[in-house]
Image (cartoon, rainbow, N blue to C red):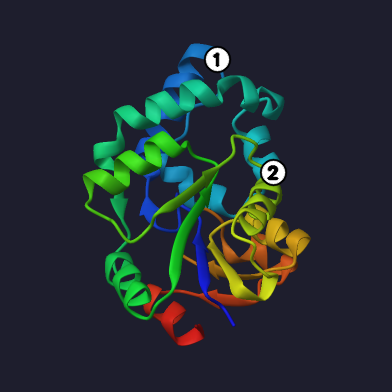
Amino acid sequence: MVKHIIFDFDGTLVDSKDAVISAFNYLAEKYKFKKLDPGNIEFLRKLSIIERAKFLDFPIYKIPFLVGEMYNLYKQSIKHVNLFSGIRDLLNELEDKGYSLAIISSNSEENIREFLSRNQIDNIKEVFCSSNIFGKDKIIKKFLKTYDLKNSEVIYIGDEKRDIVACKKVGIKVIWVGWGYDAINIVKEEHPDYIVDAPEEILKIL
């Protein structure tokens, strides 16, 4: 039986599009790759991470070298990051039902905890992070080991293909949300266990 719910952060709990665009475009100007045009966001949602990198002339191998700068720039725009509609009510209802809530993200723990504090969200205690955007499965395994949990006791909620891939590697169920960074055409080939288009649908699944 599911006792612990793990959320992705950006694109799942929070709409951080403006903060991400601002940070990315600063780096684009500094390191001479193509800037993000807000008008292209819907188009980019339908591309894989590698395809997005090619479209933006961004060498994907540079991610580990730029992640620190990205975190710092994101922090400067954190006041523009907001919970998606319905998420606060969802978190409160899940807590009331006795679920333990956590975040596993590729953002920084400092940024996430600042957001939680700034927005008075106190029902998420555990935050696990990794700067390796393709290494989320390792962090999930660490979470399971830290709290001595069975795979069946945990479900992950995320918005990207890499979230689904990571959960499949670890062997935990995953709910994909349709309001985040990846479009349905990118994730459906990975066969998420559940697909939702509104936060209240998560309650029905659980």
**Residue at the spot 53% in from the left edge and 46% down from the top edge:** 128
61 vs 49: above or below: above
Relative side of 180 to 1, left or right: left
Task: State the image quarter where residue 83 is shown.
Answer: bottom left
Answer yes or no: is residue 179 visible: no
123 vs 38: above or below: below
Mark 2, residue position: 135
Q: Residue furthest bottom?
A: 204
Mark 1, residue position: 32
Quarter holding the N terminus is: bottom right
**What's the mark number on residue 138?**
none
Relative side of 99 to 75, left or right: right
Residue 160, image x, y percentages: 59, 56
Secondary structure category for the residue under label 1: loop
Answer yes or no: is residue 161 visible: yes
Sequence-earlier tag: 2 or 1: 1
Mark 1 burial class by Cα count in 10 Å: few <14, some 14-19, many 20+: few
Residue 34, image x, y percentages: 54, 25
Mark 2 or 1, closer to the camera: 2
Residue 175, image x, y percentages: 57, 71
**Residue at the spot 50% in from the left edge and 68% down from the top edge:** 5
Relative side of 125 to 58, left or right: left
21 vs 49: above or below: above
